[in-house]
Amino acid sequence: MKSYVLILTALIALFQIGISQNEKPPNILLIVADDLGYEKLGCYGGMEVQTPNLDRLAASGVQFARAYTSPVCTPSRMSLYTGQYAHKHGYTTVLPVHEGSREAVDFDQFTTYAQLLRAAGYHTAVTGKWQLAALEYHPDHCRDAGYASWCVWQIWKDGAKTKRYWEATYNRDGKIVPIDTTTFGPDLMADYVIEEMKKAQAKGQPFCIQHNMVLPHVPIIDTPNDRATHTEPSLDRMVTYLDQIVGKLAGAVEQLGLSEQTYIIFVGDNGTHAEAPRPTRAGLVHGGKWQLNEGGMHVPLIVAGPKTIAGTTIDELVDMTDLFPTICDLAEVQLPKQLGNSGFSFRLALTDKAVNKRRWVTGAIGNDFAVFDGQWRLHHQKERLFDCRHLPEERAADLNDAAAQAAKARLMPVLDSLRAESGHLH
């Protein structure tokens, strides 16, 4: 069903439940890191980088210890925007916008959380990585997805791929932003986010801003910190700068007097792009982006806000699709019944009233997807089973083992049900 019909349904539902004009829905700032696995954060046991701002955010709110998604950007982000599993929405590989493709996600065929919140009176804005269409060919694509304003990296322009960091190309509400050689793209976007928060505050509107960070995606570049100290660039220092930007945005929320009205959600879009194992206090994390394994699928997820239990760690499984219904739940926006959302709201977990709805999570890449129940991971292709009982260590399961046999018998019906609803995998 066309998304505008679903939006109308949502508006009718809002009218029927009679939301009082005196009630002020909360603001939502969703920060999405680009290629950042859980193991890079100190609060998740990471040992390579100091992330004091993200650690403080976790200490002030709720840290989800087991959040999972698809191991590459387009499948993962489409699950976030639409609330559908990757094998269901069909985008299981990277949309080649960086190659100048005219292919684009048709948001008349999908309903996004931003469309629903904008229809409910939210000021919606988006930044950063927008790899769902080339804006040169689809200039209103961000608006089609539900965002009233945007400041995104225009990946393709004048027949060539552009830059995201230094000498970057950003599109703000349809116009290319003039950038000099001293402007760092991530800083430009952070300033835009703060401007949009102020704009919404001045208008008396709640805001929902999705800040798609371009950090710490390759290429490895020198951050402003590196230039100031003449330090060699590295992935870890890019993560450090990402952490500083999170601190800047969290500080702006506080300075604007919005802390008691704002939820800050931080999540990675997929695992770290790294070949070498990464040390954590629990052991070495192997694998990463592009791979359906712990290193590729396990991402950080932190939520801080006015109704969160400070310093709480939730060990329940969470899937990327769960963010869509959670954001709508926080905003008190009712989901249309015919939406067919794959996710579950975890709002109650933020107030220490967790309900364990999830028995498994899933992610996809190419023609493969996997079902993971927290201990075992079963793949669609060749029905391979992996023993994940001692993460971050994982290994191919011994199918002569009774526990492995029981796990496969338990997960096969789930796998078959997901296969049945997918027309995109073979």
Image (cartoon, rainbow, N blue to C red):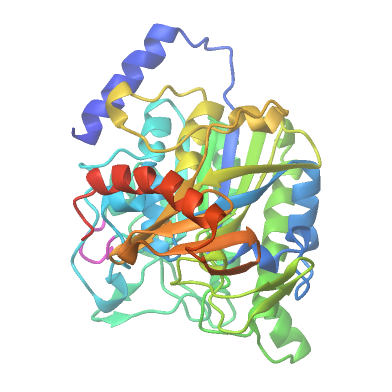
Q: Is residue 143 left or right of residue 304?
A: left
Q: Is residue 134 magenta?
A: yes
Compared with 233, 24 (above or below) is above
Residue 137, x across and y down, in percent: 20, 64
Q: Is residue 322 above or below residue 51?
A: above
Please tell me which residue is depicted at 23% across the width and 44% down the height of the picture: 420
Q: Is residue 64 visible?
A: yes
Q: Main secondary structure of the magenta part?
A: loop
Residues 35 and 66: in front is: 66
Name the quarter where the C terminus is drawn.
Answer: bottom left
Q: Nearer the viewer, residue 255 or 417?
A: 417
| Depth order, front residue of 57/246 | 57
Count the numbered circles shown: 0
The residue positioned 33% from the left and 59% from the top of the image is: 380
Q: Position of residue 246 (x, y in %)?
A: 68, 57
403 left or right, relative to 281: left
Of residues 50 and 261, which is closer to you in this image? 50
Q: Which residues are magenta?
A: 133-139
User: Can you say which quadrant of the picture contains the N terminus?
Assistant: top left
Give x and y (percent) for residue 64.
66, 46
* Residue 75 image offset from top left, x and y in percent: 37, 58
Whether residue 80 appears in this view of the structure is no
| Residue at (77% x, 33% y) in the render | 309
- 256 on left or right of 332: right
Magenta-colored stretch includes residue 389: no
